[in-house]
Amino acid sequence: MLKKLFLIMLWCGNLFLLIACKKSYLITNNTDDFLNIIKDYQSFNEEFYDLYYQEYQLTNNIILSLNKVNYPDFFLNKYDFPSFNFEGGQFVNKNYYLAASYIPKNLVPVTINKVNRKGETMLINKEALSAASKLFDDAKSKGLNLVVFSAYRSFIKQKELYDNAKDKSYVAKAGYSEHQTGLALDIATLDTGLSIYFENTAEYLYLKNNAHLFGFINRYPKDKTMLTLYPYESWHFRFVGKSLAQKLYDENLTLEEYIYQYVELK
Ligand SMILES: [Zn+2]
């Protein structure tokens, strides 16, 4: 049995296929039926029909088949596309950027526990603030003291940070930072700040196990740096809403993996 399982794993070859292998059914194995279904997708390109069909037989997921064939380099830093909106808000990473003129709607001042910098009014998306406020209250009731170090950053502010950074691997180029969406928060303790020491705190452990219940995900996890293309950041949390955060938590997916499997790229 184990040997058989091992052979199946070898055959599957990669993470996505491993996930797909768990499903043993196919909607169809008839190519005419498959064409009837896939032709209605906006990103369908007749020229690649055979490739979509091949992928579909392996993955049993039409969206993933379309994305894998149309965007094979999604997990590499090879594209330069405008950011798009999906159910979790604006998707931004090293391949998807926000325009310099993009200023999110519904920005409000951060009213929860935060660091105060002279002359700075920290802003955040209104819905994200309301969720973070509940998260911070819950943490407080357990004797934990969370602090916001950074929230919304304008394109200009991000440019300044990037230009002045000594180690540019942790700092996104202007337009490519999730902080410009107004949906990202850097959260740590006063003692550790945004450093590698934060992950050893009770506060981090709490966030790791509970942030999703309030709609937040740890955006750049340690074991997925090859997929997010960002170094591990224990302090960077992204608001995506409760139901999506729960799904990502349950399926152990980064936003990149979720998009590739469930959102049709156009
Ligand atoms: Zn951050």
Image (tube, helix red, strand yellow):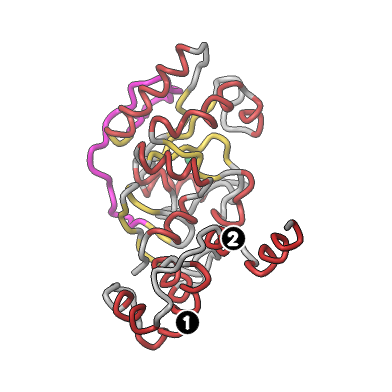
* Mark 1 Cα-neighbour bin, 10 Å: few <14, some 14–19, many ≥20: some
Which tag, 1 or 2, sits closer to the chain's start? Answer: 2
* Residue identifier under label 1: 51
* Residue identifier under label 2: 18
Residue 230 percent coordinates (x, y): 57, 51
Residue 254 percent coordinates (x, y): 50, 49
* Mark 2 Cα-neighbour bin, 10 Å: few <14, some 14–19, many ≥20: some
Label total for image: 2
Image quadrant where residue 2 sits: bottom right
Q: Is residue 247 above or below residue 117?
A: below
Which amino acid, by three-letter code, is at mark 1? Leu
Foreground of the two, 73 or 109:
73
Question: Mark 1: which secondary structure?
Answer: helix
Q: Is residue 69 above or below residue 85?
A: below
Residue 140 percent coordinates (x, y): 46, 14
Give the left or right position of residue 102, taking residue 63 as reference: left
Q: Quadrant of the N terminus?
A: bottom right
Residue 226 percent coordinates (x, y): 61, 56
Q: Which contiguous range is marked in magenta?
A: 98-123
Foreground of the two, 262 or 128:
262
Is residue 105 located in the magenta-colored stretch of the structure? yes
Image quadrant where residue 21 sits: bottom right
Q: What residue sits 42% from the left and 57% below the top? A: 259
